[in-house]
């Protein structure tokens, strides 16, 4: 496997696991606020991020490369409101989109056509991730920071379940 590509994917495996960790910290914030549905949404989000990292992990082995795991940064975990959390989610997902675009640019530079094709799944996923975050920001703004609107949203988010889309769409 091309070394530059291998190193970049290993970095991305770390970034995806960091995303899982960040969302778990957000879940813990919501649990501390008594918002179990919001916490559930974040825990599912963390599971999705682990699945994103595992799709890259499987790819490294499929292409004969070596997975190298690095230390995961400590997420902040201190937030002032539900709105602030989701604004942070959107900002984070925009950064991840930048990382995925960077990988795609590298795949083009290195003429790694198979990797370019594989990355399209992530490019589409990032559109969805940013869209979801923006939608929830709008919903939380409408609901307000306390009161019945937020309670309704919390009930709605309690029903989110995990589906591993990396497995469904993979082969
Ligand atoms: Fe792995 Fe939220 O993108």
Image: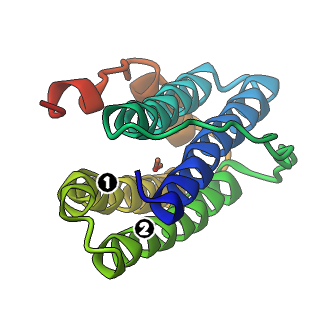
**Can you tell me whether the CB of the residue at mark 1 lies under 8 Å from the nearest atom of ligand 1?**
yes
Is residue 159 found left or right of 16 in the rendered image? Answer: left
Q: Quadrant of the C terminus?
A: top left
Q: Is residue 112 above or below residue 168?
A: below
Closest to the observer: 11 or 18? 11
Closest to the observer: 167 or 118? 118
Q: Nearer the viewer, mark 2 or mark 1?
A: 2
Looking at the rendered structure, the secondary structure element under dot 1 is helix
Residue at image position (37%, 57%) is 135
Is residue 138 found left or right of 171 in the rendered image? Answer: right
On the image, the x and y values in percent for residue 106 come to 40, 74
- Identify the residue under disc 2: 103
Residue at image position (81%, 40%) is 71
Disc number for residue 122: 1
Cα distance in 3D space between marks 2 and 1 = 10 Å
Picture quadrant of residue 83? bottom right
On the image, the x and y values in percent for residue 29 come to 78, 34
Picture quadrant of residue 55? top left
How many numbered marks does the figure carry? Answer: 2
Looking at the rendered structure, the secondary structure element under dot 2 is helix
- Please report whichever mark, 2 or 1, sits nearer to the chain's N-terminal start: 2
Closest to the observer: 56 or 153? 56
């Amino acid at each position: 496997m091309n070394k530059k590509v291998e190193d970049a994917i290993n970095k991305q495996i770390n970034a995806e696991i960091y995303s899982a960790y960040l969302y778990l910290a957000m879940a813990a914030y919501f649990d501390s606020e008594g918002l179990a549905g919001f916490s559930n949404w974040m825990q599912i989000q963390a599971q999705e991020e682990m699945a994103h990292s595992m799709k890259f992990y499987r790819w490294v082995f499929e292409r004969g490369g070596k997975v190298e795991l690095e230390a995961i940064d400590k997420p902040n975990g201190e937030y002032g409101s539900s709105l602030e959390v989701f604004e942070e989610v959107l900002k984070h997902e925009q950064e991840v989109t930048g990382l995925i675009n960077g990988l795609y640019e590298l795949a083009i530079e290195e003429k790694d056509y198979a990797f370019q094709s594989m990355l399209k799944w992530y490019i589409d996923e990032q559109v969805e991730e940013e869209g979801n975050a923006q939608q929830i920001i709008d919903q939380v703004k409408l609901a307000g920071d306390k009161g019945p609107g937020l309670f309704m949203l919390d009930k709605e988010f309690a029903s989110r379940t995990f589906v591993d889309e990396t497995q469904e769409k993979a082969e």
